Amino acid sequence: MSEKVPKMDLPSLDNLFTTQKERDEASMEKVQKIPLNKIKDFPNHPFKVNVDDSLYSMVDSIKENGLLEPVLVRPTEDGYYEMVSGHRRKLACELAQYTEIDAVVRNMTDDEATIIMVDSNIQREKILPSEKAFAYKMKLEAMKHQGKRVDLLEEVTSDRDGRKLRNPEITGIIGKISGDSQSQVKRYIRLTYLIPELLNKVDNATLGFSQAVELSYISEDYQQLINNKMDFDEISPSVSQAKSLRILYDQNNLNEDLIEKTLGELKPNQLENQNIKYRELRHYFPENYTNDKIKSVIQKLCEEYYNRWHNKERNDARWCHTSSPLTNPIYYY
């Protein structure tokens, strides 16, 4: 039997004709000048780039001092680059009429790029709930693809009480950079299940965060009905009202009438007694009107207002009716 010849580790040509210092320098990331029109935005980038005073301040700084911190990009197969970190700096350079930008080019997988993109933006001073929600969701999916110990996305985001997670340390890791708890990360991810109209209300602070989390468990058809009611009556649900709607939905009892009834209930702060003194109103009435007469007129006016506002027809110029998979029609504001 012939003996096996041991495999010899032969040096490469690079190792033969270059020094270790030269090889180390070649492997280091370097800042390069890249044309702005060769850089694409990150797909489904969750963070908005607002054209505001802070952006124009960055433009002025770039014009005066140049770009102080290079952006991070990765090469694509078509010869272009994809922005990983630096969307605002890229826009500021464009507004400053630059044609090139300083960039670090790094080869990364989709998941590696997603995690870096989220982590580099999540600590911004101003961040919308919707931005954080989709960023957390993207990072969770990336970690799952990388084989980290993490629940399937559906399992992580469907727990009712927001606390019991099979692998809670993973959501804790996701929120660690921004200072959110593992349960809060999960609650943010729930916002991605809202229809755009309701999610915009969360960003605009016209719908509370806790209320939004409850409504996210309701199907989109019913979310649309809830949104229409909120717009039409210029109201926003309390936490208890949002929980009631969710319970009705879980029990398969939710319908348009119960949405109207639930959202039409007075909140505790609306039940406080408000005393109006007659002397504050008397100058609106003839001098010979008694207090009882004034009260009677006010009650009649309030009744007329109630009938116009709460019983108004929903087919006026501001509404259009469309068919719906539900028993009751959906009205779009």
Image (tube, rainbow, N blue to C red):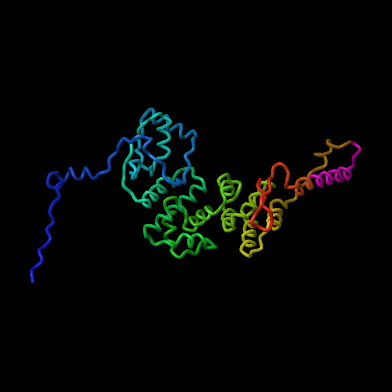
What is the number of callouts on the image? 0
Q: Which one is nearer the viewer's eye here, 296 or 207?
A: 207
**Observer-nearest residue: 332 or 263?**
332
Left or right relative to 282: residue 107: left
Q: Spot the residue most to the right.
A: 288
Which quadrant of the structure image shows residue 29? top left
Write down the region rendered in magenta.
287-305
Residue 280 position in % (x across, y down): 80, 39
Indicate whether 267 appears above or below 47: below
On the rendered image, what quadrant is the N terminus found in? bottom left
Q: Is residue 106 left or right of residue 263?
A: left
Tell me where residue 67 appears, x and y as whole percent: 36, 33
Check the image and report above or below for 76 versus 252.
above
In this picture, residue 233 sits left or right of residue 148: right
From the top left corner, tell me how far across and down residue 61 is, in percent: 40, 30
Front-lying residue, 289 or 20: 20
Q: Is residue 303 magenta?
A: yes
Q: Main secondary structure of the magenta part?
A: helix
Which residue is painted at 55% across and 63% down in the image? 160
